[in-house]
Image (tube, rainbow, N blue to C red):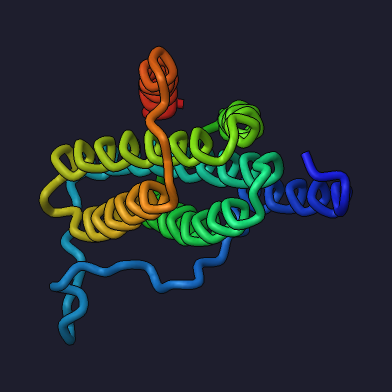
Amino acid sequence: MRQTGLLDEILGLTGQAMATLGGQTVAARPTPKPVDEQLEGGLAKELSPADQALAGALMRVNHVGEVCAQALYQGQAMTTPSEKTREALLQAAAEERDHLAWTETRLAELRARPSLLNPLWFGGALVMGLVAGRLGDARGLGFVVETERQVEAHLASHLERLPLDDSRSRAIVAAMQADEKAHAEQALAAGALALPEPIPGLMRLAARVMTQVAHRI
């Protein structure tokens, strides 16, 4: 971890954690809207109670993923030895903050709450990020690739599960999926090396536990 400016980094991370967990995130980009709402006079379809509950649970899981993304990227940026990689991680974190704000907005619209365990998810992801940054440049970028590929697949499964009438949630998830794919491609172009087993498998297991718990709590 850097000695110069370490206190500033810790204070910055503390502020970011408070904003992330406190629902105070502001997006730099507008919330994606479905095509039918982009047309003049377009309105969102009313969801049935069952569809609204399902969409709320799925978007809660996606919100947890974005809480974790903030912790992962910020933690990895603090410990990576490369200034170039650090800048790339912080840029990705900024784009992920848009996702965080979008999912927060959609949860409110669906009258669904965030996960009660968000502080736990944030803390666990922060530790993973701090460790990933110490793996070195190529392996650290490999961690980014593996994370983003798993998130991209996860979002694809949500596009299959979200109610067809919930065009608002579907537009948000599709935009998030495109960003995750771009982040993985950028990390590969920067020289990422594949992570050795069993690390990817352990990451998938941790993600599975998180999604199952966050779906309900």
**Percent x, y of residue 178:** 28, 56
Relative height, residue 183 to residue 116 (above, below): below
Identify the residue at horizontal 13%, vertical 54% (top origin): 165
Identify the residue at horizontal 18%, vertical 45% (top origin): 159
One can see residue 85 in this view: yes
Q: Nearer the viewer, residue 20 or 128?
A: 128
Q: Quadrant of residue 205?
A: top left
Q: Quadrant of residue 60?
A: top left
**Percent x, y of residue 43:** 19, 72
Q: Is residue 162 left or right of residue 12?
A: left
**Percent x, y of residue 64:** 47, 38
Identify the residue at horizontal 14%, vertical 40% (top origin): 160
Identify the residue at horizontal 39%, vertical 54% (top origin): 186
Find the residue positioned furthest to the bottom: 40
One can see residue 216 in this view: no
**Percent x, y of residue 200:** 38, 22
Relative height, residue 21 to residue 83 (above, below): above
Q: Nearer the viewer, residue 115 or 81?
A: 81
Q: Nearer the viewer, residue 17 or 109?
A: 17
Q: Is residue 69 left or right of residue 167?
A: right
Q: Quadrant of residue 31?
A: bottom left
Relative height, residue 8 to residue 208 (above, below): below
Q: Is residue 63 left or right of residue 158?
A: right
Relative height, residue 69 to residue 143 (above, below): below
- The number of callouts visible is 0
Find the residue positioned furthest to the left: 164
User: Looking at the figure, which quarter contains the N terminus?
Assistant: top right
